[in-house]
Image (cartoon, rainbow, N blue to C red):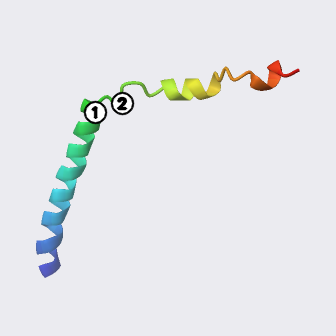
Amino acid sequence: MESLYLLIPISIILAFVIGYFFWWSSKNGQFDDLEGPAHRILMDDDNTFTEDK
C-alpha cells in the first residue's frame, strides 16, 4: 500500500510530461507532413548509376 503513495504521483507527473512533449511537437509542426518523407523515399531521382552507361 505504501508503494501506491509513490507510484500514483509519479504516474501523474509522467502523464503530464508526455502530454507536454506531445503538445510541443504538434505546435512545432512535427505532424504536419506525414506522407512526404515516405513519398520522397519511393520517388528517388538519383540517376547516377544510369548516367554512367
Q: Residue at x 24, y 38 (%)?
A: 24
For residue 31, the mark is: 2
Locate the N terminus and report the quarter of the image it occupies. Answer: bottom left
Residue 42 in percent (x, y) is at: 63, 26
The amino acid pointed to by label 1 is Ser
> N-terminal of the two: label 2 or label 1?
1
Secondary element type, mark 2: loop
Q: Residue at x 22, y 38 (%)?
A: 23
Locate the C terminus and report the quarter of the image it occupies. Answer: top right
User: How many neighbours does mark 1 have within 10 angstroms: few (below 14), some (14-19), or many (20 or more)?
Assistant: few
The amino acid pointed to by label 2 is Phe
| Lateral position of residue 12 relative to residue 27, left or right | left
Residue nearer the viewer, 52 or 5? 52
The image quarter in which residue 13 lies: bottom left
Q: Residue at x 64, y 21 (%)?
A: 43
Residue nearer the viewer, 39 or 51? 51
Do the CB atoms of the residues marked 2 and 1 lie less than 8 Å apart?
A: yes
Q: Residue furthest front?
A: 52
Q: Which residue is mark 1?
A: 26
Q: Can residue 1 be seen?
A: no
Residue 21 in percent (x, y) is at: 25, 44
Vertical position of residue 37 compared to residue 9: above or below: above
Secondary element type, mark 1: helix
| Lateral position of residue 21 relative to residue 3, left or right | right
Q: Residue at x 74, y 21 (%)?
A: 47
